Amino acid sequence: MTQTTSPASASDKSLETMRKFAETYAKRSGTYFCVDPGVTAVVLEGLAKHKEDLGAALCPCRHYEDKQAEVEVAFWNCPCVPMRERKECHCMLFLTPDNEFAGPNQEISLEQIRATTQPA
């Protein structure tokens, strides 16, 4: 089944790539997705869309004056420097088990993501 996406949505291919990356990274880093799967879905959609538009998975939860310049610096490319160095994820995508917003999951399906991010 092929889904149509709005111009603001990432393609299924990009979203699936980002979903697999996030699951692998969560397991490797011992982190978990947010207890609210909607948070995880929206962040993954933003990362996938940035990957398509900018060529890198730039953190979608920050404001940038010049997104392309930020991509080149790579500080906020996911996983960002604060995440890699201190396990601090501003987006609440990768949460340590002791974080009050951490859920039990390190996996999310494409269907779960689309259920949250697709316009009605």
Image (cartoon, rainbow, N blue to C red):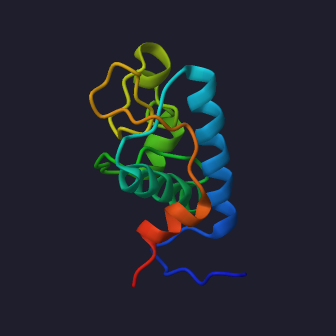
Indicate the quadrant containing the C terminus: top left, top right, bottom left or bottom right: bottom left
In the orientation shown, which residue stands out farthest toward the front?
104
Residue 36 location, x and y as percent?
35, 48
Please state if 11 lies on the left or on the right of 103 as rendered.
right
Q: Nearer the viewer, residue 52 or 70?
A: 52
- At 54% from the left and 47% from the top, the residue drawn is 57
- At 36% from the left and 32% from the top, the residue drawn is 102
- At 59% from the left and 84% from the top, the residue drawn is 4
The answer to whether residue 117 is above or below residue 71 is: below
Indicate the quadrant containing the N terminus: top left, top right, bottom left or bottom right: bottom right
The answer to whether residue 20 is above or below residue 86 is: below
Residue 53 location, x and y as percent?
55, 62
Please state if 11 lies on the left or on the right of 68 as rendered.
right
The answer to whether residue 27 is above or below residue 110 is: above
- Dividing the picture into quadrants, the one containing residue 23 is top right
- Dividing the picture into quadrants, the one containing residue 33 is top left
Please state if 80 lies on the left or on the right of 90 as rendered.
right
- At 49% from the left and 79% from the top, the residue drawn is 7
The answer to whether residue 108 is above or below residue 21 is: below
Q: Nearer the viewer, residue 27 or 54?
A: 27
Residue 66 location, x and y as percent?
37, 51
Total count of labels: 0
Residue 69 location, x and y as percent?
45, 44
Please state if 14 lies on the left or on the right of 43 as rendered.
right
Q: Nearer the viewer, residue 63 or 10?
A: 10
